[in-house]
Amino acid sequence: MRKLWGGAFGTDGDALVERFGQSLESDLRFWRQDVMGSIAHARMLGAQGILTVDESQRLIGGLEAILAEGPESLPRDVEDIHTAVELRLAELVGDVAGKLHTARSRNDQVATDTRLYLRSRLPELQSSIKELQRVILTTARDQRRTVMPGYTHQQRAQPYTLGFHLMAHFWALQRHGWRLANVDTLTAYSPLGSAALAGTGFPIDRFATAQELGFVEPIPNALDATSDRSFALDALHALAALMIDLSRVSQELVLWSGVEFGFVTLADSVTTGSSIMPQKRNPDMAELIRGRTGRAIANWVALASTLKSLPLGYNRDTQDDKPPLFESLDLAADALALTALMLEGAKWNADRMRKTMKRDFSTATDLADLLASRGMPFRKAHEVVGKVTRACRERGIGLEDLTAEDLARLAPEAPGEALAALKPERSALARNSVGGPGLKAMQAQLRRADKRLKAPGFSSPY
C-alpha cells in the first residue's frame, strides 16, 4: 500500500494493519471536496509566495484535471483519499505535486473535507423537506373537512380532521429544516491551515482559503479545528430526530392501511406483495423507514461514544466519524422521498373514518364544555358527563344515539341544543382556538404554513 509517510520506518506494515487502517472506500465520498480544498490551498500558497506562481498554477491545473477525470482515475492501493489525490497529481504534474502538502496536514484536510461534504448535502435534504411539506400541505387543504378520530394513549380521545392531523407533521418537518439550517451554520467555519494541531510557521492566509471554499471564516484555534467533530454529531442528531418523525408517519401509514383501521390505501408503487399470500398488500417502505430509523439513532450514539473521552488533538478514532454520517445522510434523503411518494399517492377513506367514530364517546368533552359554558364548574360538568357515558355504555348506545328525553333524564342541566354538540363533525369543526381543527383556525394555520413553504430556507422553527 502506497503512503505519504514511512521514512522513519524500517519495515512495511502488516497486511492486517494496513487493511484495518485503510479509509479510502469511505473517503471516496468526498473526493471532490478534497480536490477543491487542495485547489484553494495551492492558490493561496502561490499568492503568499510560499510557492512560485508557476508551481501554484501547475498544481491547480493538475487538480482541475483530476476534477474533470472523476474518481475513477484515482489509485486504490493507498491509505486514504489524500494519498490518492496526491499520487494521481504526481502522475499528472511530476515532482511539484510533493509541494502541495506544504503548510497543511491530513488532520486539517479531513476536517475540511468532511465539513465541505456535509454542507453540500444539507441543501438537498432541506429541498426534500420542502417537497414533503408541499405534499402534506396540499393534502391537508383537501382534507380539512374530513373528520377522523383523534387518539391519546392510543385510545379514542376527540374528533378532529385528517387535514389537522397531517399539519402536525408539517410543523415537525419545519423544525427539522430549521435544525439542519443550524447545522450548516455550525459547520460553516474552516479548519484548513490549522495543519496537524498547532498551525504552521509559513505565512499562510487562512481567510483566503476559507473565502474560496465558501466558509464564513477560519476556526480561531488550530487545536480545536483539528479536534472538533461536534458539527458531525449535531448533524447526526438532527438526522436521527428527522428519521424519528418520519418513522411516526410510517407507523401511522402501517396501522391505518390495515383492515382493522382501513383509513388509507397506499399506491401499488410503494407497496409489495407476498410470495405465498396473493391478497397481501404490504406497506414495506413505511416499515423499512420505521426500522432503519434505529440505524440513524445508532449512528448518533456510535459517534457520541467515539468522541466521549478523546483528548484534544487528532486521534485516529475520528476516522470512524464519516461512515455513520454518510449512512444517516443517505437514509434521511431516501426516507424523505419515500414518505412524499406514499402520501402523494395515498387514497383516504373518509367514510371509514367517520363510521369508526360511532359510539366511541369522543364527543364527551364537548358536552362537558357546553355545561361549563353555561356556568357549571368544569369539574362538576366532567362528573355529570362521566355518568352519562356510563349509562350509555350500560345500554349499549353512544352519545350520538341519545334522545332529548334521555339527555333530560341523565343530565337535566344540559340544554336541548346539546344533542347537536355530540356529532363528531360539529365537534371537530367548531374548535377554532389558535392551532385547532376548526375551519377558521385551519385557514389561519394553512396560510402560515404556505408562507413558510414559499420562504427560502428555514429561518424559523414555526
Image (cartoon, rainbow, N blue to C red):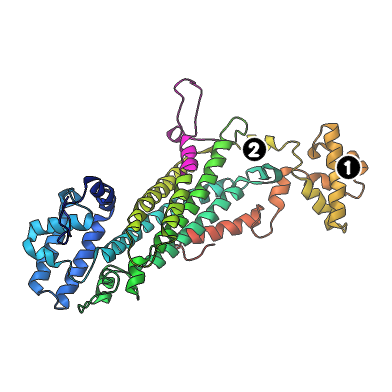
Q: Which residues are magenta?
A: 265-292
The amino acid type found where label 1 is placed reads Leu
Q: Is residue 280 magenta?
A: yes
Which secondary structure lies at badge 2?
helix
Identify whether 401 is placed above or below 29. Answer: above
Q: Position of residue 243 (x, y in %)?
A: 48, 49
Query: Residue at coordinates 17% horizontally, 78% vertically from top-left?
Result: 48
Kindly identify which residue carries mark 2.
353
Quarter holding residue 31: bottom left
Query: Residue at coordinates 79% horizontally, 39% vertically from top-left?
Result: 400
Give the label on residue 407, or none.
Answer: 1
Quarter holding residue 338: top left
Q: Position of residue 231 (x, y in %)?
A: 40, 63
Name the foreground residue: 309 vs 107.
Answer: 309
Identify whether 422 is placed above or below 120. Answer: above
Which secondary structure lies at badge 1?
helix
Q: Position of residue 229 (x, y in %)?
A: 38, 62
